[in-house]
Image (cartoon, rainbow, N blue to C red):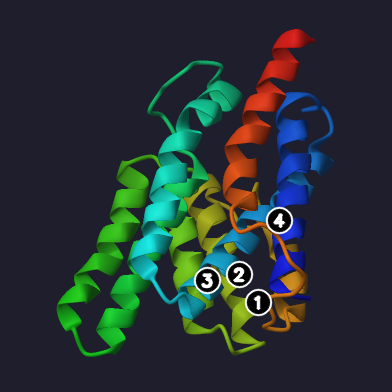
């Protein structure tokens, strides 16, 4: 599977998840399918960081769309224009990118940057990012083990286990279906694949939430 295929799978499963959340909560299978999308976005972020030639532009792009997505996210999840109980996943991905920068700098011998890694974990929880430490941990592990076909799925499993134990005090709770994201991740061939607009996922994220919210109001 190419990066383009992974991106489409992530987008499609995200839409299925959000339709289940807003319109069909009586069918939890839709939410189970939707658990696949976030690990794929984290994996694509780790891959994007590895291949990018300008990490500052990458970070700026995430920051701009994180801010642009917050009102659609709050309308979609809470029905209000702005609230601070949870933030959209773009903020989480931005913080995960910062953690990856710290990891890379630490590996290069700039050990002071190592302090930024636990700081990212703490900030993700304090600032009420969508998945908290889970998204940061998973992205960092994906980056460290990106070329290991055994440790990649193991990283996904360990991250989900940690998330469920922390939030539900039991393994294989709400987030467990996300482990099936290991299938497309292991099948990833390292290639970019067919053409997709560069900003497709960035624009689609806030736009589809806003459209779903408006459809809900209309119904």
Badge number at residue 10: 4
At mark 3, the secondary structure is helix
Asked if residue 144 is positioned above or below residue 77 in the image, the reply reads below
Pointers 2 and 1 in contact (CB under 8 A)?
yes
Residue bearing the label numbered 1: 153
Give the camera-side residue of 121 and 77.
77
Instruction: Report the number of numbered marks.
Output: 4
At mark 1, the secondary structure is helix
Alpha-carbon span between mark 2 and mark 3: 18 Å
The nearer-to-camera label among 4 and 1 is 4
Residue bearing the label numbered 2: 156
Give the camera-side residue of 29 and 210.
210
Which residue lies at the image location 69% right of the left edge and 51% below the top edge?
35
Horizontally, residue 204 falls left or right of residue 51, namely right
The nearer-to-camera label among 2 and 3 is 3
Alpha-carbon span between mark 2 and mark 4: 15 Å
Alpha-carbon span between mark 1 and mark 3: 19 Å
Residue bearing the label numbered 3: 48
Of the 4 image quadrants, the one containing the N terminus is bottom right
At mark 4, the secondary structure is helix
Q: Residues within 10 Å of mark 4 (few under 14, many from 20)?
A: many
Residue 51 appears at what percent x and percent y? 50, 79
Pointers 2 and 3 in contact (CB under 8 A)?
no
């Amino acid at each position: 599977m190419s990066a383009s295929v992974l991106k489409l799978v992530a987008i499609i499963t995200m839409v299925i998840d959000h339709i289940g959340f807003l319109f069909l909560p009586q069918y939890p299978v839709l939410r189970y399918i939707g658990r696949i999308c976030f690990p794929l976005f984290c994996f694509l972020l780790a891959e994007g960081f590895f291949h990018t030639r300008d990490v500052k532009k990458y970070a700026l792009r995430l920051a701009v769309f994180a801010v642009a997505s917050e009102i659609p996210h709050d309308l979609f999840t809470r029905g209000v224009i702005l609230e601070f109980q949870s933030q959209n996943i773009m903020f989480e991905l931005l913080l995960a990118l910062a953690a990856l920068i710290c990891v890379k700098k630490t590996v290069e011998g700039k050990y002071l940057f190592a302090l930024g890694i636990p700081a990212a974990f703490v900030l993700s929880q304090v600032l009420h990012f969508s998945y908290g430490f889970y998204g940061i941990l998973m992205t960092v592990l994906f980056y460290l083990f990106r070329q290991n076909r055994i440790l990649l799925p193991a990283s996904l499993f360990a991250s989900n286990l940690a998330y469920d134990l922390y939030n539900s005090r039991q393994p294989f709770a709400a987030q467990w279906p996300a482990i099936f994201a290991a299938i497309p991740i292991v099948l990833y061939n390292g290639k970019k694949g067919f053409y997709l607009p560069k900003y497709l996922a960035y624009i689609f994220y806030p736009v589809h939430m806003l459209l779903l919210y408006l459809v809900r109001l209309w119904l």
